[in-house]
Amino acid sequence: MYGSTWVVTREKAEKIREELIKRGGIEENPKNIYEIWRIRLGNSTFIYYSSNKLYSTPSNEIWRIWELIDSIIKTESNNFKNYLLGFDETGKGEPFGPLVLAGVMVPKEILKDISLEFSTSDTKKKHNYEYWEKLLFSLNSIENLKYKIDLIMPREIDRFNINMLMDLGYEKLLKNLIYNVSFEDLRIVIDDYGIGNILNKYLQSVKEKGAEVITISDSENKFIEVRLASLIAKSYREKFLKKISKVYKLEEEFIKGNLSDIYVRDRFLQYKKQDFWFLRRSFGEKKIKEKPSFIGMVDKESRVICFFCGKSSYQVILDNYKFKCIYCGKEMKDLQFALKYKYGVIKVEDERIINMILDILKHKDILDGFDFVLPEDSLQDLLPFRDMGKILIDTKSSYPTYIELNLQGDSIVFSLIRNV
């Protein structure tokens, strides 16, 4: 015997509540902050959650009530866009590990299959690693659910305005998720962290093309797609922190701790003196961060601009850990940031280049946070870097833009591909 779930707006939920009471339903007090109301009718309890999920506990006696609810929300479902996109992040206020952004795309037809477990899971509470691992496994088992994550690295946050970096990261995630999807089919909900001009400009252009766009605070308690994005971001960050603590022999309680704890703060100040890639050395400091002006190094045609010779190109050379203009050979400082936020995806097929990437990841930070698309038989060496959140790895996805790597002597040629 199974219960039943529906996704329904507050307006429709109120109509359902009235119908349940008319038929003898008895209102009960909500049992937690995520319940808006609960009503007992017959041998079933109906619970409406802040995530817009309505759940009826298992019963074989009230199927006619379930049919009534189906008829009430039928028109509601028809009003949804075909794809619901939600975006959220975790780690913004933490001193250790990357800031993880997540975007999820939920086809309208699978809303009814989204488990109640995801509607009630609380990302603000502490859970053990196994809890998040199980949750992510369940999410990955949902057919046709599509999601992507992005990483903002501690060194980037130490230097640049964090909200502006998030603007760029979310724009990149959006473009990757909606690739080959009609704008008219989209509803986009982003938790409002203080969205700036960079992302607002892009959202406005998407809205003008037919998408529905919602930016709102506390969105994970109002939209199931944002809650899913929040759970995905949190699950991945928990995996990264666990691996970091193991590799660098740090207690998990410390690396997940709060600086209000004297012991955690003292340890943090000790590690702050060292050059660990996973530590935000500027955490707690009040200083004005740079604007991400590096974004101007890529023009509207997605070509790299050399500020020395003034030429634009879809190619750049990486030589001796430095990006250089393919025309004049001058070093292009900070280009890795522009490539990461404008492209972000690196496709590699040559085994020799994979070995060179491995060397770079061990000694430099210029490829940190990139998403690598690799042949499945070439993953093994890079998995440790993926597992602690230094890079991302993919094997199948298609992207609107990506970087293709080839060898030219001892240098790597970065070829910028626009797949649009």
Image (cartoon, helix red, strand yellow):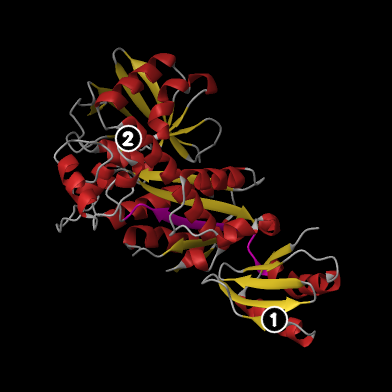
How far from the left and from the top, in percent, is residue 339? 33, 38
Q: Which three-letter amino acid code belongs to the residue tagged 1?
A: Arg
Q: Earlier in the sequence, mark 2 or mark 1?
A: 1
Quadrant in which the N terminus appears: bottom right
Asked if residue 339 shows in the view, the reply is: yes
Could you classify mark 1 by the number of other residues whose Cα lies within 10 Å: few (under 14), some (14-19), or many (20 or more)?
some
> Which residue is the site of mark 2?
368
Tell me the element at label 1: helix
Say if 89 sits above or below 252 in the image: below
Say if 348 sits above or below 296 in the image: above
How far from the left and from the top, in percent, is residue 381? 42, 21
Tell me the element at label 2: loop
Q: Is residue 21 left or right of residue 345?
A: right
**Cα distance in 3D space between marks 2 and 1:** 51 Å
Q: Is residue 394 left or right of residue 266?
A: right
Task: Confirm whether the magenta stretch covers residue 379.
Answer: no
Task: Look at 29% across and 45% down and name the residue there.
Answer: 254
Asked if residue 186 shows in the view, the reply is: no
407 or 250: nearer the eye? 250
What numbered label is drawn on residue 207? Answer: none
Could you classify mark 2 by the number of other residues whose Cα lies within 10 Å: few (under 14), some (14-19), or many (20 or more)?
many
Task: Confirm whether the magenta stretch covers residue 85.
Answer: yes
How far from the left and from the top, in percent, is residue 176? 49, 45
173 or 123: nearer the eye? 123
Say if 167 sits above or below 58 in the image: above
Task: Look at 20% across and 25% down and name the residue there.
Answer: 329
Q: Is residue 170 left or right of residue 106?
A: left
The residue most toward the front is: 263
Q: Which residues are magenta?
A: 79-92
> Which residue is the site of mark 1?
17
Q: Which marked residue is nearer to the observer: mark 2 or mark 1? A: 1
Q: Are marks 2 and 1 in contact (CB under 8 Å)?
A: no
